[in-house]
Amino acid sequence: MSSDSGEGLVKGGAIVFCAGALATLVTFVPLFLHLTPLPSAAYWLSMLMPLGLLLALTGLLRSARAQRRRANAS
């Protein structure tokens, strides 16, 4: 596995994390403005935030391991 796959995971994780952060903001705004709360499916979209963090950390670890392997091979 190359560090490119880890880099892709980091970028994908960042995108998923941002989508989850946006969903979190959208779901909490009606609560602060005393509007009708959104359906529970909107709250489940907020779970994209930790998923994105997990993807990015996995990509970071994959890249670090690939870099260590290349350093040990030379």
Image (cartoon, helix red, strand yellow):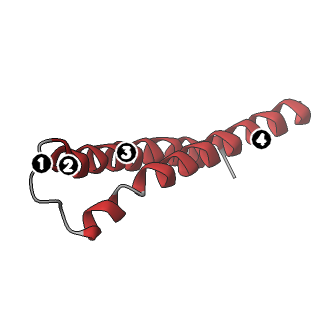
* Location of mark 1 (residue): 34
Q: CA distance from mark 4 to mark 2?
A: 44 Å
Sequence-earlier tag: 4 or 1: 1
Q: Mark 4 = which residue?
A: 65
| 35 w.r.t. 60: above or below | below
Element at label 3: helix
Looking at the picture, tell me which residue is in the foreground, 60 or 67.
60
The x and y percentages for residue 69 are: 83, 39
Disc 2 vs disc 3: Cβ atoms closer than 8 Å? no
Q: Quadrant of residue 56?
A: top right
Q: Earlier in the sequence, mark 4 or mark 2?
A: 2
The quadrant where residue 15 appears: top left
Q: Are marks 1 and 2 in contact (CB under 8 Å)?
A: yes
Label number found at residue 24: none
Q: Which mark is residue 31?
A: 2
SS label for mark 1: loop
Q: Which mark is residue 15?
A: 3
Mark 1: amino acid: His
Q: Amino acid at mark 2?
A: Leu
Q: Report, in whole angstroms, how far the alpha carbon at label 4 lies from the one at label 1.
A: 49 Å
Residue 38 in picture, x, y percent from top left: 18, 62
Image coordinates of residue 37 in percent, x first then y, are 17, 59
How much space separates mark 1 and mark 3, taking CA atoms? 30 Å
In the image, what residue type sits under mark 3?
A: Ile
